[in-house]
């Protein structure tokens, strides 16, 4: 076991990175110190941070459009038209959605009514059958009573 | 927290007693002093990353990130022993982060034991063929261990830390560290023996 431990220590012993490691790092540090962004380098971490920065860059550019000095009345008018069109569009969409919902509710109500009628019809049939059965039982009992009375007279 | 503080302040008596000129100068913004600190610890950080990812270029990238992070957080570093502790901890976290990000991107993280070729590097120049083969084989099998056991083995055999120190660095219960070590050693020994023959 001791032997294997030594082999592991030997295999995993420290190694130096490439000769320009410190210089490259210091360049990045200097760039960061100057307040600039980190230099873009081909590496997984840089690529990831670039992706993350993409969305915020886009927003920053959009915001910059509105701070430009040449933004005039035409631009303002275009923006206002766009906003009004958006409001109208949203309103129309909501009306359409409401109409669809109302139609769905009417359809559901009609379906419910139909189901109710079917149940009532079924209950009426069941009730009629029950009446017939009740009458038959009643007749049978009446006959039994009559026969018993005849026996008693005899 | 108490134990962590104890560890990072008492790693070795000599180390804590060493003059920390470079550290205090670096904290005051001296870039030459920061470069001194980097040169002093770069082999530790780079090797931890390299033993974890088994790719020199990615390891250098990770090591650069760790030192950039150090540059931004120099004010929080108290002593040279604390610096060493901090670097090991941050490197461990970065390695695991990298591995998880690779996994989520569908990348290949662990090198398959059967197909992984040993990359040619200046460090692998054979002194004698059997030594080189053994070293290469061990590194290949270590790189195939799961993330946390791999870090535990690296800290134990590269940095010569005892299980208690590893538990502090990786914020892991001591028994978990011991069990990772025991199991990893058994796996490694079995695989190396199978790969290189029973005479090992």
Image (cartoon, coloured by chain):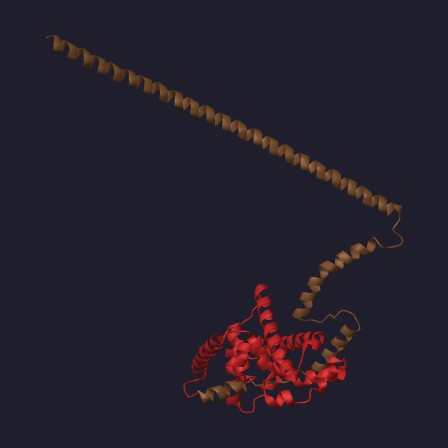
Number of numbered callouts drawn: 0
**Residue A14 image-quadrant placement:** bottom right
Q: Is residue A11 visible?
A: yes
Pick the residue in front: B53 or A25: A25
Residue B103: which quarter of the image? bottom right
**Which residue ends up furthest to the left in the rendered image?**
A154
Taking the spot 71% from the left edge, 82% from the top edge, the residue there is A22
- Find residue B190 and report its horizontal and vertical position in percent: 43, 80
Which of these two is toward me, B21 or A101? B21
The chain coloured red is: B
Image x and y of residue A23, in percent = 73, 81
Q: Residue furthest front?
A: B2
Does residue B200 appear left or right of residue A68 in this picture? left
Image height check: is A32 above or below A107? Answer: below
Relative image position of residue B43 (x, y in whole percent): 63, 84
The answer to whether A27 is drawn above or below residue A100 in the figure is below
Display colour for chain A: brown
Would residue B127 appear left or right of B67 to someone viewing this image? left
- Between B186 and B172, the residue placed more toward the observer is B172
Q: Residue at x 22, y 13 (%)?
A: A142
Q: Residue at 45% across / 79% down in the picture?
A: B182
Residue B99 falls in image quadrant: bottom right
In the picture, the quarter occupied by the C terminus of chain B is bottom left
């Amino acid at each position: 076991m001791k032997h294997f431990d030594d082999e592991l220590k030997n295999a995993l012993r420290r190694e130096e990175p490439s000769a320009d490691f410190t210089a490259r790092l210091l360049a990045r540090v200097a760039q960061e110190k100057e307040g600039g962004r980190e230099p873009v380098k081909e590496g997984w971490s840089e690529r990831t941070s670039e992706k993350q920065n993409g969305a915020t860059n886009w927003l920053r550019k959009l915001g910059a459009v509105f701070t430009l000095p040449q933004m005039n009345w035409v631009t303002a008018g275009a923006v206002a038209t766009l906003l009004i069109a958006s409001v109208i569009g949203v309103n129309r969409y909501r009306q359409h959605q409401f109409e669809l919902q109302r139609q769905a509710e009417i359809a559901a109500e009609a379906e419910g009514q139909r189901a109710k009628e079917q149940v009532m019809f079924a209950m009426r049939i069941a009730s009629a059958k029950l009446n017939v059965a009740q009458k038959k039982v009643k007749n049978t009992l009446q006959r039994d009573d009559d026969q018993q009375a005849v026996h008693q007279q005899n | 927290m108490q134990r962590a503080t104890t560890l990072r302040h008492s790693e070795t008596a000599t180390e804590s007693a060493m003059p920390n000129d470079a550290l205090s100068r670096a904290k005051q913004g001296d870039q030459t002093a920061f470069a001194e600190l980097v040169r002093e610890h770069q082999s530790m950080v780079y090797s931890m990353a390299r033993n974890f990812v088994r790719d020199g270029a990615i390891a250098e990238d990770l090591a650069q990130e760790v030192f950039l992070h150090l540059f931004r957080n120099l004010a929080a570093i108290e002593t040279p022993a604390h610096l060493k502790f901090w670097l090991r901890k941050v490197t461990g976290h970065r390695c695991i982060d990298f591995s998880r990000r690779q996994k989520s991107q569908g990348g290949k993280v662990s090198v398959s034991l059967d197909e992984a070729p040993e990359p040619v590097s200046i460090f692998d120049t054979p002194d004698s063929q059997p030594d080189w083969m053994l070293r290469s084989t061990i590194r290949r099998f270590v790189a195939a261990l799961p993330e946390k056991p791999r870090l535990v083995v690296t800290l134990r055999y590269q940095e010569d830390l005892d299980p208690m120190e590893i538990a502090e660095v990786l914020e892991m219960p001591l028994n978990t560290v011991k069990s990772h070590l025991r199991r990893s050693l058994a796996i490694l020994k079995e695989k190396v023996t199978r790969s290189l023959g029973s005479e090992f």
